[in-house]
């Protein structure tokens, strides 16, 4: 009976490592984690658009993917998007116009465990920029 204990423990450990890697807890590839972040960001951004419309805004989507340019931009890896707000046909440009949406965005991220960032947070001055925090970037 004792000669089977070690092989069984090893098999169990290997299955546990495999399970954790498949679920993304341990050893997930950078690509796998990026795909998950892109999915979470896309769903959150869709919710943001619906929330803005519920508040009576008209919206249009700005830059969501940027080919070339700054490779450190989260737009470059599809983790950032710009939102354009309109109220009564007037384009809203100031960061202040987006503050309540930014607060909602951050709160949504906290509620769902997603590191969402807003471009107007901490005086950044880019109110229409919404992103998924990635490797310390916003």
Image: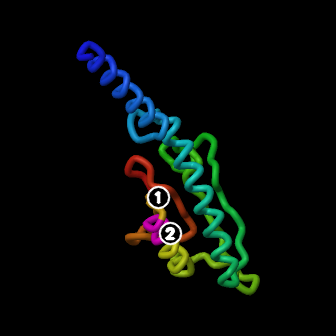
Residue for point 51% across, 41% down: 71
49 and 61: which one is in front?
49
In the picture, the disc for residue 108 is 2
Labels 2 and 1 touching (C-beta < 8 A) = yes
Is residue 125 visible to the viewer in this orientation of the structure?
Answer: no
Q: Residue furthest left?
A: 2
Residue for point 48% across, 63% down: 112
In the picture, the disc for residue 114 is 1
- Which region of the structure is painted magenta? 106-111
| Residue 121 forms part of the magenta stretch | no
- In the rendered view of the protein, which quadrant contains the C terminus? bottom left
Element at label 2: helix
> Compared to 51, does 134 lie above or below?
above
Residue 92: image x %, image y %? 63, 79
- In the rendered view of the protein, which quadrant contains the N terminus? top left
Q: CA distance from mark 2 to mark 1?
A: 8 Å
Mark 1 neighbour density, 10 Å: few (under 14) some (14–19) many (20 or more): some
Q: Main secondary structure of the magenta part?
A: helix
Q: Residue furthest top?
A: 3
Residue for point 68% across, 81% down: 54
Q: Is residue 102 left or right of residue 1?
A: right
Residue 55: image x %, image y %? 65, 83
> Which image quadrant is residue 6 in?
top left
Residue 33: image x %, image y %? 49, 41
Element at label 1: loop
134 and 19: which one is in front?
19
Is residue 34 visible to the viewer in this orientation of the structure?
Answer: yes
129 and 8: which one is in front?
8
């Amino acid at each position: 009976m004792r000669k089977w204990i070690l092989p069984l423990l090893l098999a169990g450990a290997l299955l546990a490592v495999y399970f954790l890697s498949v679920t993304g807890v341990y050893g997930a590839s950078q690509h796998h984690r990026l795909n998950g972040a892109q999915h979470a960001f896309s769903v959150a951004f869709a919710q943001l658009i619906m929330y803005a419309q519920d508040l009576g805004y008209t919206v249009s989507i700005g830059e969501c993917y940027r080919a070339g340019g700054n490779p450190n931009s989260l737009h470059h890896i599809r983790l950032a998007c710009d939102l354009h707000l309109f109220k009564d046909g007037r384009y809203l440009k100031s960061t202040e116009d987006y503050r309540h949406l930014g607060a909602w965005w951050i709160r949504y991220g906290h509620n769902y465990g997603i590191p969402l960032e807003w471009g107007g947070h901490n005086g950044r001055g880019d109110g229409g920029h919404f992103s998924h925090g990635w490797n310390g970037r916003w």
